[in-house]
Amino acid sequence: MKPKVLVARAVFPEVVERLAQYFEVESNPRDEIWSPAELVARLHDKLGVITTASERIDADVLAGAPNLRAACNMAVGYNNFDVPAMSAAGVMATNTPDVLNETTADFGWALLMATARRITESERWLRAGHWQKWAYDMFLGADIHGATLGIIGMGRIGQALARRASGFDMQVLYHNRSRVPETIEQACKACYVGKEDLLRQADHVILVLPYTAASHHTIGEAELALMKPTATLVNLARGGIVDDAALARALRDKRIAAAGLDVFEGEPAVHPGLLEVPNVVLTPHIASASEATRRAMANLATDNLIAALGFGPNAGKPPCLLNPQVKQK
Ligand code: GLV
């Protein structure tokens, strides 16, 4: 009998076919959103699961999933996993790093450009039929070229964002939990500064740090107050890194010029204050959503699950294991 696995959200059909070579697969082609109790009920007899950032795997879920040996996230961020609880329960945790770096950095730039140059705001105005005549001061925005970019979170995506900035002759400042090696700083032409200095000096701030208890509300009222009134803020990272209510107030009061957000506290709900202000570009968590990259992420999550459950070329050694200390069941 094949081991049983669960694919918690709809995925590319070929992923389910790949898994079916090794496992009895329960999938979710209608992409229903299961409550934690429904997820637990489905996990009860499963050895493995492919999750997305919307399924939480914590001590409560693990208590109802006694056979679970691996949970493989189809995302690089894994704040939906309680990794210590998973390790204690003998459950391997994996994510999908690297395959999305360049695509996510491309999107960060798209969001930055759209935000600084007021692309979506002006398009909404045009579609609404307001364009009667051209005027010299229509939708004046902020320059990207020659400006100072501040990147908070200098991991692989932060570095890919920084490398792109040289084409725009930008000065790049970064802040990170720890300074990255000098060779990386040189390759990215990026200069390490404290968070407050970055916020004071940057014309455009991009957030690409992981969400943890320590990074909760990295940008709140006090941090927004340090930014230039002409500055823009882009959140590519996770909801909760920014205090969305404080940001909505800052945008409404024009304490910063504009923001571009791909992630939100409590998504898919969006803070009503953000929906009311014109100077924010809002996208539904799609930074890694190119066709090729989403396929690469789905396949990497699949490689991880196949290996974690002892099959394929990496049997027993999933390529992206987050908790190597786990005592395998
Ligand atoms: C997307 O948000 C990811 O973490 O991959």
Image: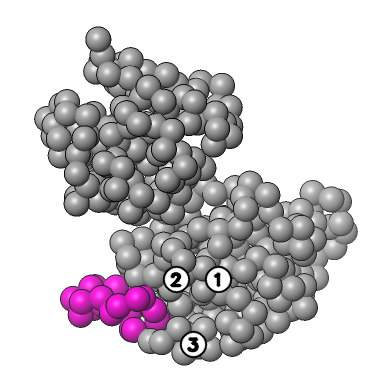
Quarter occupied by residue 296: top left
Q: Which residues are magenta?
A: 171-192
Q: Is residue 251 visible?
A: no
Residue 34's disc is: none
Mark 2, residues whose alpha carbon is within 10 Å: few (<14), some, or many (≥20)? Answer: few
Q: Is residue 198 visible?
A: yes
Residue 293 position within the rendered picture, expressed as x and y whole percent measured from the top left: 37, 41
Q: Amino acid at mark 3?
A: Glu
Q: Is mark 3 within 8 Å of ligand 1?
A: no
Q: Amino acid at mark 2?
A: Ala
229 or 46: nearer the eye? 46
Q: Amino acid at mark 1?
A: His
Give the residue drawn at x 25%, y 76%: 180
Quarter occupied by residue 6: top left
Give the residue drawn at x 62%, y 53%: 266
Give the residue drawn at x 34%, y 38%: 71
For label 3, the residue is 196
Mark 1, residues whose alpha carbon is within 10 Å: few (<14), some, or many (≥20)? Answer: some
Q: Which SS class for mark 2?
A: loop
Give the mark nearer the N terminus: 1 vs 3.
3
Q: CA distance from mark 3 to mark 2?
A: 16 Å
For label 2, the residue is 214
Give the mark nearer the N terminus: 3 vs 2.
3
Mark 3, residues whose alpha carbon is within 10 Å: few (<14), some, or many (≥20)? Answer: few
